[in-house]
Amino acid sequence: MTTIACLHAARSNIEVFEQALTTLDYENVQLLHRVESDLFAQTQGENGVTPEIIASTRQAIEALCQQADVVIVTCTTLGVAVWEGEFSKPVLRVDATLAKIASRYHGTILVLCTAQSTLESTTQLFSAFIPGDRLYVELVPRAWAWFNQGDIDGYHQQIADYIQQRPECALGCIVLAQASMSGAEKRVNSTLAVLSGPQVSLQAALDALQ
């Protein structure tokens, strides 16, 4: 049995990843979940992601490495702890797997976030894979308030409405950078590819074990 561990900032992402796993045609794969909502909450203050938060996140990641074959950090804010970290098992950032896939598309790539705390790190990450003249990283206004209220349907609809109301331009694909945004793509009426993290990162985790 292959075990993929997921480090989340929100408990609601457990169901998102469990559902994503059912869409992949793999047997003998199970998910192990750990939620670090308190760590994420600390990043929402004025100091953002501090060295202490990075150290605590790395400790949580290594603890999961002892229980699983591969680890996915599903939170784009806490994901910065993966960089320059040394772990005993493969560790993936959900947004890094998205950036690699998005870089294969031609044209301009639109990357959407909903949490202000992840905007800077997401921009830096995607810029490492996609030239700046082909990259837009934007914050969906007001969406995060819906998420914090626990209204996931309203949250996803806010994201979809933003995409639909955005001025037309030649895009190669749209990326929903945060795992919590997965589900909004079903509400988007577009011929463009809309990429979300759970399926992409789970597949990348399994590929990392090959």
Image: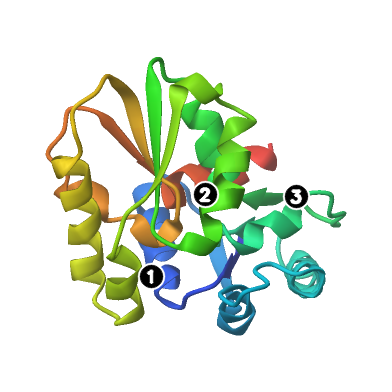
Say whether marks 2 and 1 touch (CB < 8 Å): no
- Given residues 21 and 160, the one toward you in this image is 160
When the figure is inspected, residue 159 is found, relative to residue 143, above or below; the finding is above
Q: CA distance from mark 2 to mark 1?
A: 14 Å
Q: Which mark is residue 202?
A: 2
Is residue 22 shown to the viewer in this render? yes
Q: In the rendered structure, which amino acid carries the disc numbered 3?
A: Pro
Left or right side of 34 for 164: left
Q: Is residue 85 left or right of residue 16?
A: right
Task: Using the image, tell me which numbered label, if any, was put on residue 90.
Answer: 3
Q: Earlier in the sequence, mark 2 or mark 1?
A: 1
- Please name the amino acid that badge 1 sits on: Glu
State the residue position of label 1. Answer: 15
Residue 164 position in % (x across, y down): 15, 42
User: Which quadrant would the N terminus be assigned to in this image?
Assistant: bottom right
Q: Quadrant of residue 131?
A: top right
Image point (28%, 65%), residue name = 142
Instruction: Count the labels in the image.
Output: 3
Q: Secondary structure at mark 2?
A: helix
Residue density around tag 2, few if under 14, some if 14–19, many if 20 or more, within 10 Å:
many
Q: Is residue 80 above or below residue 9?
A: above
In the image, residue 5 lies at what x, y percent?
A: 62, 64
Q: Earlier in the sequence, mark 3 or mark 2?
A: 3
Q: CA distance from mark 3 to mark 2?
A: 13 Å
Q: Amino acid at mark 2?
A: Leu
Residue in the image at 40% along x and 15% along y: 106
- Residue shown at 29%/31% (left/top)? 193
